[in-house]
Amino acid sequence: MKAAALHAVTIGNAMVDIIASVDEDFLSEHRLTKASMMLVDDARSAFLRSRITPSVLSSGGSVANTSHGLASLGGRAGFIGKIAADDLGEVFSRDLAGAGVEFFPAPMDHGLPTGRCVIVVTPDGQRTMNTYLGAGAVLCPADISRDAVQRAEWVFLEGYLFDKDDAKEAFRVAAQYAHDAGRKVALTLSDSFCVERHHDDFYSLVCDEVDLLFANEHELAVLFDTEDFAASVQVLREKCPLAVVTRSKRGSVVVTADEYIEVPALPVDPIVDATGAGDMYAAGFLYGLTHGKTLEQCAEIGTICAAEVIMHMGPRPQVSLASLLPIDLR
């Protein structure tokens, strides 16, 4: 029997998120840059974990979260990533299966533990991430399932994975598989520091391979080397067929060669934890694209999904996202 088509398959770091609330002093005491993602080694990760009391332990990773959100909306989602045969790998696999996400794991003979991300959240809801990539860091072109990519309408690539050369090449392989089958490629820039470290590679990928770009305005400023938002938008029009830029409390904008669509954020007070907001926005937008919605409606769905996830701790929705959509957006 032929496997069912997928609305999207995502490719990224397979992580287990370990999330805790901390005060501002914790950041300065442990030399953490607020609201950033820092790569750490196994020892640093273990040390930070020993200094917190986790409130959430769940499978994570940016685009794995997006797959979870898409499934919660009623979409058919898959994920490609690399884990180990250990306890955190079991947590990760079990969570995806429970959410209805198809998992296409890479071989587990690499000798590294499953990746984990220690996320500390300050009282203003900002999350600071300390990521030990573990097995996720050795994703390579051979790990990309051609069948999974070509079954999906969209393949969604995670910018965080760009810290390794093999992963960069894996992205290009996935994009080639997708385009060979007439599929579309989306990319999230993920983090401004990541874009800065690998600027030329990101720029080339956006210009050559990407049909849809997700970014926040800070990441966009680094990618195009300008703090002038209007100038960034003009470059987007020239370089990318479709782009979505999130602007925190100012909502989001959708940009094409001919359109500039602004969608306001939904009021959320207080913001408990911003972890996963961009991931859920992407889930909502991709759901809309694969279900015949207008670009404005896609952004509205993304906004609803992002608002749900910032009202509680953790990067995954606590209710069915489909239940939050008005009838015209389902």
Image (tube, grey):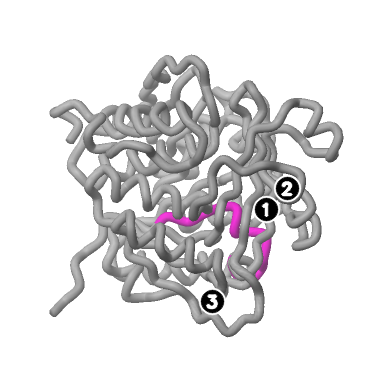
Image vertical order of residue 197 relative to residue 90, above or below: above
Amino acid type shown at disc 3: Ala
Tag 3 and tag 2, C-beta contact below 8 Å: no
Q: Give me the C-alpha separation between circle 3 and circle 1.
A: 19 Å
Q: Which residue corresponds to the image point at 62% horizontal and 21% vertical from the top-left?
A: 124
The amino acid beneath tag 2 is Met
Q: Which residues are magenta?
A: 156-167
Q: Name the secondary structure under disc 2.
A: strand
Q: Which of 105/181 is in front? A: 105
Q: Secondary structure at mark 3?
A: loop
Neighbours of disc 3 within 10 Å: few (<14), some (14-19), many (20+): some
Q: Mark on residue 131?
A: 1
Residue 144, placed above or below residue 124: below
Q: Residue 243: percent from the left, percent from the top?
A: 43, 38
The quarter holding residue 79 reads bottom left
Q: Which residue is mark 2?
A: 38
Q: Are marks 2 and 1 in contact (CB under 8 Å)?
A: yes
Which class describes the residues within 10 Å of circle 1: few (<14), some (14-19), or many (20+)? Answer: many
